[in-house]
Image (cartoon, helix red, strand yellow):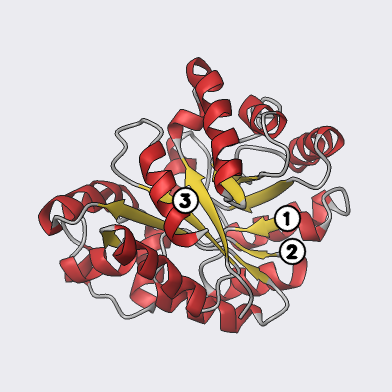
Amino acid sequence: MSEPLISLWGGGPWQDPARAAEAREVAAELEELGFHRLWFSGGFGDGVLPAFGELLAATRTLGVASGIVSIWTATPEQSARAFAELEAAHPGRFLLGLGNSHAPAVEGRGGRYDKPYSRTVDYLDALGGRVPRERLVLAALGPRMLELARERTLGAHPYFVTPEHTALAREALGEGSWLAPEVAVVLDADAAGARATAREHLATYLQLPNYTNNLRRLGWGDDDLLHGGSDRLVDALVPWGPQERVAAGVRRHVEAGADEVAVQVLGGRGDFPRAAFRELAAALV
């Protein structure tokens, strides 16, 4: 087995213009610590999200990926143009992650969540060759989207998944496609506290049918999906505990076939959990 690539998945602070200077400083430290890539969400509806370019400019080798740009909020033309701008300024370092989002998010903005698979196919057709397939991944969970990721892109970036899903995704993708699951973790040895932190995170996603349907395909029942998740589901989705136990949970995805794991540290309360990043680097990088 080749050495796994360990990346980080980040949320709000990375996009906050008021914290841009701090974000650049943290990104430079992540590069020094040896992390492969930084994933964070954002769109191109109004042009390139400034943070993508700023973080690439603040580093020399650290990759940056969109996890993910929604196909409902950015047109193929906007995504292609944004990719071209980032590629021209920072060759080879930006990975475009696309996804079909969720019905509540799309409909909450007044859109219609209709035939997401077909829309994804049409989106990829419209991109044409403007984004090379080796620089493009899909947020794929189910069999059809995984097949599309295998056929049309570098591979898949599944979010909110267990090691069992990673194994199934590897089987569906085959050995030639890239598999980079997101894995949320909690560095807290207290079971009650760690699970409470995990449930705050899970509660939002357990209201989204794409995720709950995927969990049901894996055999999880309705009781597991209530009240932020059963203890068994929390433990399967979110490795928690001291450094060594969390690292072992991340490695389970590597053992299941992941080429890269995008680790999301929970519990930072909107801050950059720099101490946790250092612990993870010591254990995994």
Residue at the (32%, 64%) spot, across then down: 244
Q: Secondary structure at mark 3?
A: loop
Quarter of the image holding residue 245? bottom left
Q: Which mark is residue 136?
A: 1
Q: For the residues marked 1 and 3, what is the alpha-carbon distance in whole angstroms?
A: 20 Å
Depth check: give the residue in front, 33 or 130.
33
- Give the vertical position of 250 relative to 16 (above or below): below
Classify 10 Å Cα crowding around label 2: few (below 14), some (14-19), many (20 and above).
many
Q: Is residue 234 visible?
A: yes
Q: For the residues marked 2 and 3, what is the alpha-carbon distance in whole angstroms?
A: 21 Å
Identify the image quadrant of the N terminus.
bottom right
Residue matched to label 3: 102
Q: Nearer the viewer, mark 1 or mark 3?
A: 1
The image position of residue 153, as x and y in percent, is 74, 63
Q: For the residues marked 2 and 1, what is the alpha-carbon distance in whole angstroms?
A: 5 Å
Residue at the (57%, 58%) spot, across then down: 139
Depth check: give the residue in front, 237 or 212.
237
- Give the vertical position of 228 relative to 58 (above or below): below
Residue at the (64%, 75%) spot, across then down: 2
Three-letter amino acid code at the position of disc 1: Leu
Q: Secondary structure at mark 2?
A: loop
Q: Are marks 2 and 1 in contact (CB under 8 Å)?
A: yes
